[in-house]
Image (tube, grey):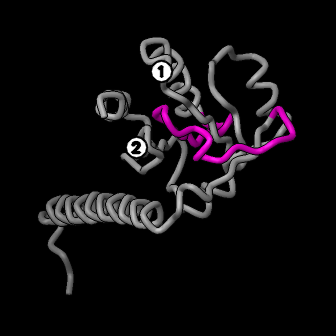
Amino acid sequence: MRLDPKYFNLFIAVCAVITLVAIVFGTMSYHSNQEKILRDNIAETDLEQIVFQYIIENDSLSLPELKGGPVLIDFWATWSGKAQNTHRFLGDLQQHHPDLIILAAAVRDDEQLVRDYIDSHNYNFTYVIGTEIYHKLQVPGVPSQILIDREGRFFDFQIGENREELERKIKLLMEN
């Protein structure tokens, strides 16, 4: 079967549209599936058992120690420009919500790069190692945040650099 040359451009355009639809559908389906996996993994995890290792100090921190204040766990890495942009946003936001505890959980990163980053930024975050929890919960990427209410219960999560949505969720968390 031969394609008549006068229909070649139309054929290519139809193929391109079908490919684009398949890519968009696949991406949306994948993202939705990743969110479901994360939500399920958080629901199956006893948050009271989560322990983080401090980056600067040779000590650990468990989530029950933070009860009473709303907590935002921010999974980040020095190599992620989006994560660094989110830190600037969270640093500004924390000035308006001083009781918001931000655990900056570094993942898949060189320890010295993380220490240099901490030294060069003046954020009022608690810096912890987050790789183990990141993998356990199957967090789909950085930046991602998990919000914990004042009672130590899971409140919500945010994947990616959507400042407006993150700010909305934090506002709801603070009102809770």
Question: Which residue corresponds to mark 2?
Answer: 158
Nearer to me, 51 or 127: 51
At mark 1, the secondary structure is: helix
Q: How crowded is mark 1: few (under 14 residues within 10 Å), some or many (20 or more)?
A: some
Task: Name the residue rendered at 55%, 25% in the picture.
Answer: 87
**Residue 101 pos. (x, y %):** 54, 29
- Please name the amino acid that badge 1 sits on: Phe
Question: Which residue corresponds to mark 1?
Answer: 89
Which quadrant is the N terminus positioned in? bottom left
Task: Name the residue rendered at 60%, 35% in the picture.
Answer: 103
Snapshot quadrant of residue 39: bottom left
**Residue 58 pos. (x, y %):** 87, 40
Q: In this view, does 51 lie to the left or right of 31?
A: right
- Please name the amino acid that badge 2 sits on: Gln
Circles 2 and 1: CB atoms closer than 8 Å = no
Nearer to me, 17 or 4: 17
Q: Is residue 57 left or right of residue 70?
A: right
Instruction: Give me the C-alpha separation between circle 2 and circle 1.
Output: 14 Å
Q: Is residue 121 above or below residue 176?
A: above
- The disc, 2 or 1, on the residue closer to the chain's N-terminal end is 1
Q: Is residue 154 above or below residue 162?
A: below
Q: Is residue 132 above or below residue 123?
A: below
**Residue 50 pos. (x, y %):** 62, 55
Q: Is residue 1 left or right of residue 85?
A: left
At mark 2, the secondary structure is: strand
Q: Is residue 65 magenta?
A: yes
Q: What stretch is highlighted in magenta?
A: 56-80
Q: Is residue 150 left or right of residue 55?
A: left
Residue furthest bottom as drawn: 1
**Residue 59 pos. (x, y %):** 82, 42
Task: Name the residue rendered at 42%, 63% in the picture.
Answer: 43
